Image: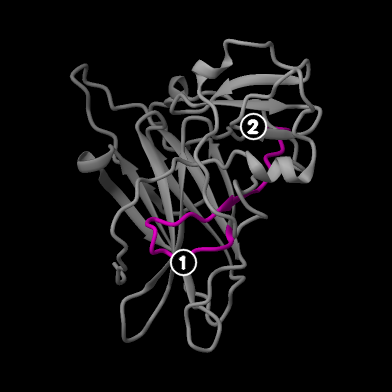
Amino acid sequence: MGDQAVNGYQPQMGLNGHLEATKLLSLRVISGHNLARKDIFGASDPYVRIDLVRGEGDDEEVIDAVLTKTKRRTLNPEWNQEFLFRVKPAEHRLVLEVYDENRLTRDDFLGRIELPLATLPRQRPGRSIPEKNYVLRPRSARSHVRGHLRLFHAYVPDPSGLPDDDESLEEPSEPGPDWEVLDAEGDGPDGANAQPAASSSDSAMAPLPHDWEERQDAIGRVYYVSHALRLTQWERPDAGRPANGTASARKRRTLTWGRRSPPQQDYTIGHL
């Protein structure tokens, strides 16, 4: 990491005279793929704004924000930029929003993702952490959004010696590198959004098929994992019908990581 700048939260001194425990998160924004066209010449000039956020609704607060470089005249930008964030995993999340830079007008919104932090992996000797694709989401019904971002994220050792917040992490069982973060209700990054199909109250009937496992994400939503099919979905699989192993079933109810945002008025922003 060397002299790389650390963004994000500044630990506060507690009543016990000790600094708050935090974690150091490495986020690499690798690339974007199949982004929406906004310029009249059929391309865009995309960049990513990354906000470290806490709270919800009216209490939401942006703690810190950084920008990637702008890539000119492309729908498949490659940034390969790494950022370090000091975070409290149980309280914070990252919001990544992609924009098309304009010289004379406000920048156009190209999509967003939200990244809960409590279940992200920790970097350890001998551990291989794969890159992941995240489908871009609209922020209102007026947003024209398509494509996905490719990211790498992992908690890394903190050379500063500050207190380490390991207790707030929920260590996930890592899927293999051939697992996919697929879109819901569509044929990939351009499909429409879908609400989770099942809640925990739906799961009191038949037992799960033998190769399925029930889990909860960082905000308490129930989802289901098949290790045999390498499939993750919201809908509870029924032991009495075929598992969702076909391509059409995978498209129908596949889990996309990140909390859905309520519809709100569309808007654009200029640079910070």
Q: Amino acid at mark 2?
A: Arg
**Looking at this view, is 184 or 115 the one in front?**
184
Residue 255 in the image, given as x and y percentages of width and height: 60, 38
Q: Residue at x 46, y 66 (%)?
A: 144
Residue 185 in the image, given as x and y percentages of width and height: 60, 48
Q: For residue 20: magenta?
A: no
What kind of secondary structure does the magenta stretch mostly adopt? loop
As drawn, is 42 to the left or to the right of 213? left
Say which residue label 1 marks: 144
Query: Coloring scheme of the render?
Result: one colour
Residue 181 in the image, given as x and y percentages of width and height: 64, 45
Q: Which residues are magenta?
A: 125-148
As drawn, is 46 to the left or to the right of 238? left
Q: Quadrant of residue 143?
A: bottom left
Q: Amino acid at mark 1?
A: His
Image quadrant occupied by the C terminus: bottom left
Calculate the distance from the C-alpha at mark 1 to the C-alpha at mark 2: 40 Å
Residue 75 in the image, given as x and y percentages of width and height: 59, 74
Task: Identify the secondary structure beneath mark 2.
Answer: loop
Number of the label disc, if any, that sits on residue 124: 2
